[in-house]
Amino acid sequence: MGKILTSVAQCVEETIAVVGPHLVLGAPLGLGKPVQLMNAFYQRVAADSSLSLHIVTALCLEVPKPSSPVEEHLAGPIMQRLFGDYEELAFLAPYRAGNLPENIQVTELYFKAGSMKGRSLPQQAYVSSNYTHIVRDMAALGVNVMAQLVAARESNEGLSLSLSCNPDLTLELIDMVREPHQPFMLVAQIHDDLPFMTLDAEVSPAAFDLIVRNPEYNKTLFAVPNAAVPLQDYATALHASSLIVDGGTLQIGIGALGDAVARACIVRQQDNAAYRALVRELTTTPCDLAIDCGPFDKGLYVSTEMFVNGMMHLIEHGIVKRKVYDNLLLQQAINDGRISHHIDEQLLAYGRTRGLIPARLDGASLQQLQYWGIVPADAAIAGSALVINGQSLANDMDDPQVRAALLLAVQDKSLRNGRILHGGFFLGPRDFYDKLRSLDDERREQICMTGVRRTNQLLLDYPLYCAQRRNARFINTGMIVSLSGAVASDALEDGTVISGVGGQYNFVAMANDLPGARSVLCIRSTRGHGKQLQSNVVPFYGHTTIPRHLRDVVVTEYGVADLRGQSDSEVIKRLINIADSRFQESLLAFAQTHGKVSADYQIPAFALDNTPARLQKVLSPGRHNGLLPDYPFGTELTGQELALGSSLRAVKALSDEPAHFIAATFKALLHKADPHAAKPFLERIQLEHPESTKDFVIQQLLLLELEERGFLKVS
């Protein structure tokens, strides 16, 4: 059993004593970082020039920082409510500013989206890697300490630990052989609020060398607030959700688009007629991938890198419910309809025919059949006899009396140890963690947090994973798609890293290797506003995350483009059909000038009204009747905070359009708001008495915006 300590400082000293003065500290992405322990390593080395520290990690979480005093007044109480006493990673501020101590360096393999744009040191130290290769790359960087936040529980067998939110990397590290001449320490910090996940995520304390347990370190867990979903993303999500096959497999990502896809699936399940009407009215571009978008009667199975809040809602709504089994014979028979999940004579006959059930049971086969629930847990082998429900029978599975006794013992039982979700890591809002903590035993056994070497690829067991991941739809987001079908998702063409490759390439490649699977990359057709408006469907781009030879399905708010196996000319035509109509002619002209599309080709009439106005017309009723709410899975913000937040964003956006800003300012200065209605809003952000001309203009623009949104009465 790993040595249990109460001090992170002591853990640091004992680690240095084993691995020496040159520490290369690995830590999981996201929630799995043991913040206090990592900060102790950082502070110890920063104070001692005889030591060195190289931190290797990904997705460092930090509390959002307001960019102005007005935002601070609004966001301060919200941040306190959402993040409580969450402790920041001590290295983040100097890392971002480029002034880390000389004996400390940081390498990230994935950034929080946009967080390191314009930051030289992080951009220079970034390592681009598929997520399935990160352990390999960590080893190449010389990682000699791995630190993980874990959950714990006591039972009759003693202390047990759970890798909880991040079995993704540590499972592989635990399996690595530790060579005697290369000291390596695996250290853990227990957090009492971290959900305890079982199955692959549950490990013995012996897996770790040192374990820190001290309630004083139980600071607020980092939780990602639910994001508002714009209508543009709902349109994309409705298109994407129409490609999901009942009885199939699903993967979606985090953020507004992932929430929108999950919500679209729920609408499809709960109000199928309304769902079909929305999709039908939205869809102008024909697509051969169209399916019967009925409810999810068979249900979905999830195999995902990231287990997100939207997936929990899909479980709660009975959409994610298809169970898979880690036994190829069972899985294939269920797929083919030769057996059901119910244990009956048909299953026993199949098991005997295919060798799943031997004629005579031995200890190993008995244990295996008990695991699947085919044989009762109290069955035993006694000499040459098989004991079932206390009855001594011949150990002969072809004996009708034995079969009858067995069926009686498992009457009305179903197969055990089926999983509805395999995930690599999780991150989400507070109520998501609450739900995970409160799972009952049955539901907890259906959710398996495991390594990305399982979720993100097929190499460990290609036949089994093909059988489990039927009709898979891997739905992810990209930033830019070129007319060749190549997609940029992680960086700009000047080399600036926005986020990271993560698992996207793995899922796209897997979709091309997995029978019946499709990769669905969702891209907003435009970015910016007014004169800054640009198309995200572009003639070409100087950076690629997903190469053109893996082009598959691209979805924008204007439709679905099936690119797999198509000629370059057809790919270009299909992408133009789902581009914003304000950019279609220039895209076509480029393609024709370069000989990629015939000179006489014209954009079809059905694709010529790809405009925000049409989306607004189609989807606004869904917004008002609750089908497509701003926050599909709720929000911790008050109504007043929501009104102020959206209005302040609108005011801030005016600065990008000088002409609009001037016109709006004149309009704002010429009106007078109801002072009684305005007072609580202005008090909330301490703007009732502006101290500068700038603050006065912001106040007036804000009041105008609040009035036009219906939050204030016009005087």
Image (tube, rainbow, N blue to C red):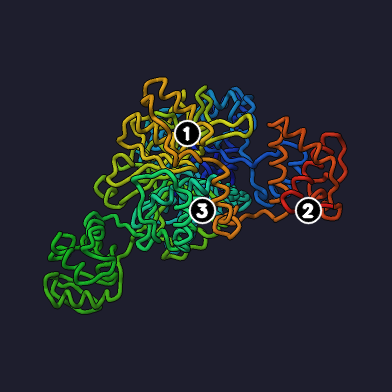
- Quickly name the residue at label 3: 309
Q: Is residue 185 left or right of residue 614?
A: left
- Quickly name the residue at label 1: 489
Q: Give, as a three-letter code, the residue at label 3.
A: Asn
CA–CA distance between discs 1 and 3? Answer: 22 Å
Q: Secondary structure at mark 3?
A: helix
Comes first in the chain, label 1 or label 3: 3
CA–CA distance between discs 1 and 2? Answer: 41 Å
- Quickly name the residue at label 2: 712
Q: Nearer the viewer, residue 525 or 569?
A: 569
Vertical side of 589 occupied by 316: above or below: below
Count of numbered circles on the image:
3
Inspect this view and state whether residue 17 appears: no
Q: Residue at x 44, y 42 (%)?
A: 606
Q: Give, as a three-letter code, the residue at label 2.
A: Leu
Q: Is residue 13 left or right of residue 421?
A: right
Q: Give, as a three-letter code, the residue at label 1.
A: Ser
Q: Nearer the viewer, residue 197 or 388?
A: 197
Q: Quarter-wise, where is residue 657 in the image?
A: top right
